[in-house]
Image: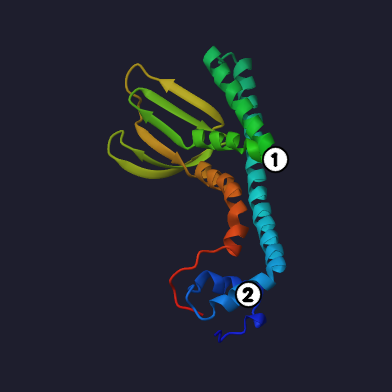
Amino acid sequence: MSTVDYSKYSIEELLDVRSRIAPDSPNFQALVAELDARKEKIDELAQQQEQDSFSIAENRVKIIGYFQLAAAVAILIIFMLSVFDGSASLLSTSISIVAIVLNAVAGYTAVREMHDKYWISVLNQLLQVPSFAIGSIKAAYSGLGGLYLYINWTSDTQFGFSASFSPGFSFLKYKVSSPEQFLGIDILALIFLGALLTVSQVKSTANKLIHPTPNSGAAD
Protein backbone atom coordinates (compact mmCIF):
# COMPACT_ATOMS: atom_id res chain seq x y z
CA MET A 1 0.00 0.00 0.00
CA SER A 2 1.32 3.43 -0.91
CA THR A 3 2.49 5.67 1.92
CA VAL A 4 2.85 8.76 -0.27
CA ASP A 5 0.15 11.10 -1.63
CA TYR A 6 1.49 11.89 -5.09
CA SER A 7 -1.46 14.15 -5.90
CA LYS A 8 0.33 16.90 -3.96
CA TYR A 9 3.49 16.59 -6.09
CA SER A 10 4.28 18.93 -8.94
CA ILE A 11 4.89 17.42 -12.38
CA GLU A 12 8.61 18.07 -12.04
CA GLU A 13 8.66 16.27 -8.71
CA LEU A 14 6.71 13.32 -10.13
CA LEU A 15 9.18 12.95 -12.99
CA ASP A 16 12.08 13.15 -10.58
CA VAL A 17 10.60 10.38 -8.44
CA ARG A 18 9.87 8.32 -11.56
CA SER A 19 13.56 8.43 -12.50
CA ARG A 20 14.65 7.11 -9.10
CA ILE A 21 11.93 4.79 -7.81
CA ALA A 22 12.41 1.03 -7.82
CA PRO A 23 9.69 -1.04 -9.56
CA ASP A 24 9.19 -3.13 -6.42
CA SER A 25 8.52 -0.07 -4.26
CA PRO A 26 5.13 -0.11 -2.50
CA ASN A 27 4.64 3.41 -3.90
CA PHE A 28 5.37 2.49 -7.52
CA GLN A 29 1.80 1.73 -8.65
CA ALA A 30 0.46 4.87 -6.96
CA LEU A 31 3.11 6.91 -8.79
CA VAL A 32 2.24 5.30 -12.14
CA ALA A 33 -1.45 6.02 -11.56
CA GLU A 34 -0.73 9.69 -10.81
CA LEU A 35 1.48 9.98 -13.89
CA ASP A 36 -1.31 8.48 -16.04
CA ALA A 37 -3.84 10.89 -14.53
CA ARG A 38 -1.65 13.86 -15.47
CA LYS A 39 -0.39 12.51 -18.78
CA GLU A 40 -1.76 15.44 -20.82
CA LYS A 41 0.01 18.04 -18.67
CA ILE A 42 3.22 15.99 -18.67
CA ASP A 43 3.11 15.79 -22.47
CA GLU A 44 2.62 19.58 -22.66
CA LEU A 45 5.58 20.17 -20.33
CA ALA A 46 7.78 17.78 -22.29
CA GLN A 47 6.90 19.45 -25.58
CA GLN A 48 7.61 22.90 -24.16
CA GLN A 49 10.96 21.80 -22.76
CA GLU A 50 11.85 20.21 -26.07
CA GLN A 51 10.92 23.38 -27.95
CA ASP A 52 12.94 25.54 -25.55
CA SER A 53 15.99 23.31 -25.82
CA PHE A 54 15.68 23.11 -29.59
CA SER A 55 15.30 26.89 -29.86
CA ILE A 56 18.51 27.47 -27.89
CA ALA A 57 20.37 24.94 -30.02
CA GLU A 58 19.00 26.48 -33.22
CA ASN A 59 20.16 29.95 -32.19
CA ARG A 60 23.67 28.61 -31.69
CA VAL A 61 23.59 27.03 -35.13
CA LYS A 62 22.41 30.30 -36.66
CA ILE A 63 25.43 32.07 -35.14
CA ILE A 64 27.67 29.43 -36.71
CA GLY A 65 25.84 30.01 -39.98
CA TYR A 66 26.59 33.73 -39.90
CA PHE A 67 30.25 32.97 -39.18
CA GLN A 68 30.34 30.69 -42.22
CA LEU A 69 28.72 33.31 -44.44
CA ALA A 70 31.26 35.87 -43.20
CA ALA A 71 34.03 33.37 -43.97
CA ALA A 72 32.72 32.99 -47.54
CA VAL A 73 32.89 36.76 -47.99
CA ALA A 74 36.37 36.99 -46.42
CA ILE A 75 37.75 34.19 -48.59
CA LEU A 76 36.20 35.81 -51.67
CA ILE A 77 37.87 39.14 -50.87
CA ILE A 78 41.25 37.49 -50.32
CA PHE A 79 40.86 35.57 -53.58
CA MET A 80 39.97 38.73 -55.52
CA LEU A 81 43.02 40.50 -54.10
CA SER A 82 45.22 37.61 -55.23
CA VAL A 83 43.71 37.89 -58.73
CA PHE A 84 44.42 41.61 -58.86
CA ASP A 85 48.05 41.24 -57.74
CA GLY A 86 48.63 38.29 -60.06
CA SER A 87 49.48 35.76 -57.36
CA ALA A 88 46.46 33.54 -58.00
CA SER A 89 47.21 30.16 -59.56
CA LEU A 90 44.95 27.49 -61.01
CA LEU A 91 45.29 25.42 -57.83
CA SER A 92 44.63 28.35 -55.45
CA THR A 93 41.68 29.46 -57.60
CA SER A 94 40.13 25.98 -57.49
CA ILE A 95 40.61 25.69 -53.74
CA SER A 96 39.25 29.18 -53.12
CA ILE A 97 36.11 28.50 -55.14
CA VAL A 98 35.46 25.27 -53.24
CA ALA A 99 36.00 27.02 -49.88
CA ILE A 100 33.74 29.94 -50.83
CA VAL A 101 30.93 27.67 -52.02
CA LEU A 102 31.26 25.33 -49.03
CA ASN A 103 31.07 28.17 -46.49
CA ALA A 104 28.28 29.94 -48.37
CA VAL A 105 26.09 26.82 -48.65
CA ALA A 106 26.84 25.71 -45.08
CA GLY A 107 26.10 29.18 -43.74
CA TYR A 108 22.88 29.57 -45.72
CA THR A 109 21.48 26.19 -44.69
CA ALA A 110 22.34 26.85 -41.04
CA VAL A 111 20.78 30.32 -40.96
CA ARG A 112 17.67 29.04 -42.77
CA GLU A 113 17.38 26.15 -40.27
CA MET A 114 17.48 23.47 -42.96
CA HIS A 115 18.05 20.57 -40.57
CA ASP A 116 18.58 17.93 -43.21
CA LYS A 117 21.46 19.99 -44.64
CA TYR A 118 23.36 20.50 -41.37
CA TRP A 119 25.79 17.79 -42.45
CA ILE A 120 27.33 20.41 -44.75
CA SER A 121 28.21 22.60 -41.76
CA VAL A 122 29.44 19.53 -39.87
CA LEU A 123 31.71 18.63 -42.79
CA ASN A 124 32.94 22.22 -43.05
CA GLN A 125 33.87 22.30 -39.36
CA LEU A 126 35.46 18.84 -39.43
CA LEU A 127 37.79 19.96 -42.20
CA GLN A 128 38.85 22.90 -40.05
CA VAL A 129 39.80 20.87 -36.97
CA PRO A 130 43.31 19.72 -38.00
CA SER A 131 46.23 21.79 -39.25
CA PHE A 132 49.68 20.34 -39.67
CA ALA A 133 53.16 20.53 -41.07
CA ILE A 134 54.57 17.02 -41.37
CA GLY A 135 57.56 16.19 -43.52
CA SER A 136 57.44 18.40 -46.61
CA ILE A 137 53.68 19.06 -46.43
CA LYS A 138 52.06 22.00 -44.62
CA ALA A 139 48.27 22.42 -44.71
CA ALA A 140 45.58 24.35 -42.86
CA TYR A 141 41.97 25.33 -43.46
CA SER A 142 39.81 27.73 -41.50
CA GLY A 143 36.72 29.85 -42.01
CA LEU A 144 37.67 33.16 -40.46
CA GLY A 145 40.40 31.85 -38.20
CA GLY A 146 40.87 29.51 -35.27
CA LEU A 147 42.00 28.89 -31.71
CA TYR A 148 44.61 26.16 -31.80
CA LEU A 149 46.14 23.76 -29.37
CA TYR A 150 49.31 22.43 -30.96
CA ILE A 151 52.38 20.29 -30.53
CA ASN A 152 55.54 21.47 -32.27
CA TRP A 153 58.57 19.22 -32.66
CA THR A 154 60.67 21.38 -35.02
CA SER A 155 63.56 21.42 -32.57
CA ASP A 156 62.40 20.58 -29.08
CA THR A 157 58.93 19.19 -28.45
CA GLN A 158 56.64 22.01 -27.35
CA PHE A 159 52.96 22.26 -26.52
CA GLY A 160 51.18 25.56 -26.95
CA PHE A 161 48.12 27.63 -27.79
CA SER A 162 47.68 30.13 -30.60
CA ALA A 163 44.99 32.19 -32.31
CA SER A 164 45.00 33.32 -35.90
CA PHE A 165 42.91 35.13 -38.52
CA SER A 166 43.53 33.14 -41.68
CA PRO A 167 40.45 32.64 -43.88
CA GLY A 168 40.66 29.90 -46.48
CA PHE A 169 42.83 26.92 -47.23
CA SER A 170 46.60 26.91 -47.45
CA PHE A 171 48.71 24.08 -48.80
CA LEU A 172 52.47 24.10 -49.23
CA LYS A 173 54.79 21.34 -50.43
CA TYR A 174 58.47 21.95 -49.86
CA LYS A 175 61.29 20.36 -51.79
CA VAL A 176 62.80 19.56 -48.43
CA SER A 177 61.18 19.27 -45.01
CA SER A 178 58.92 22.09 -43.89
CA PRO A 179 60.75 24.60 -41.66
CA GLU A 180 58.10 23.84 -39.05
CA GLN A 181 56.85 20.48 -37.88
CA PHE A 182 53.60 20.61 -35.91
CA LEU A 183 50.08 19.30 -35.44
CA GLY A 184 47.30 21.65 -34.36
CA ILE A 185 43.68 21.17 -33.31
CA ASP A 186 41.20 24.02 -33.75
CA ILE A 187 39.24 24.30 -30.49
CA LEU A 188 36.77 26.77 -32.02
CA ALA A 189 35.87 24.28 -34.77
CA LEU A 190 35.29 21.60 -32.12
CA ILE A 191 32.97 23.94 -30.20
CA PHE A 192 31.02 24.65 -33.38
CA LEU A 193 30.79 20.92 -34.07
CA GLY A 194 29.37 20.33 -30.60
CA ALA A 195 26.70 22.97 -31.15
CA LEU A 196 25.72 21.44 -34.50
CA LEU A 197 25.45 17.94 -33.07
CA THR A 198 23.39 19.20 -30.13
CA VAL A 199 20.50 20.05 -32.44
CA SER A 200 19.91 16.38 -33.27
CA GLN A 201 20.32 15.31 -29.66
CA VAL A 202 17.80 17.64 -28.02
CA LYS A 203 14.93 16.01 -29.90
CA SER A 204 15.05 13.06 -27.51
CA THR A 205 14.89 15.20 -24.34
CA ALA A 206 11.13 15.01 -23.90
CA ASN A 207 11.01 11.25 -24.33
CA LYS A 208 13.64 10.80 -21.65
CA LEU A 209 11.57 12.88 -19.25
CA ILE A 210 8.43 10.83 -19.81
CA HIS A 211 10.05 7.40 -20.06
CA PRO A 212 13.14 7.38 -17.84
CA THR A 213 14.66 4.04 -16.99
CA PRO A 214 14.08 3.10 -13.34
CA ASN A 215 17.25 2.20 -11.49
CA SER A 216 17.89 0.13 -8.47
CA GLY A 217 18.12 3.10 -6.14
CA ALA A 218 16.17 3.53 -2.92
CA ALA A 219 12.39 3.44 -3.18
CA ASP A 220 10.35 6.59 -2.52
Q: Nearer the viewer, residue 171 or 20?
A: 20
Q: Nearer the viewer, residue 56 or 157?
A: 56
- Amino acid, disc 1: Val
Q: Mark 1 against mark 2, which lies toward the viewer?
A: 2
Q: Residue at x 67, y 44 (%)?
A: 62
Q: Please, what secondary structure does the residue beneath circle 1 have?
A: helix
Q: Position of residue 171 (x, y in %)?
A: 46, 23
Q: Residue at x 66, y 70 (%)?
A: 36
The tally of labels here is 2
Q: Nearer the viewer, residue 116 or 18?
A: 18
The image's mark for residue 33 is 2
Q: Residue at x 61, y 38 (%)?
A: 118
Side of 58 where 181 appears, left or right? left
Q: Which residue is mark 1?
A: 111
The colouring scheme, among rainbow, by chain, secondary structure or one colour, is rainbow
Q: Position of residue 23 (x, y in %)?
A: 49, 72
Above or below, 180 relative to 58: above
Look at the image and tell me whether residue 38 can be seen: yes
Residue 122 quadrant: top right
Residue 28 quadrant: bottom right
- Amino acid, disc 2: Ala
Please say if the residues under marks 1 and 2 sit with CB atoms less than 8 Å apart. no
Q: Please, what secondary structure does the residue beneath circle 2 have?
A: helix
Q: Nearer the viewer, residue 156 or 134?
A: 134
Look at the image and tell me whether residue 70 can be seen: no
Q: Position of residue 131 (x, y in %)?
A: 44, 33
C-alpha span from label 1 to label 2:
44 Å
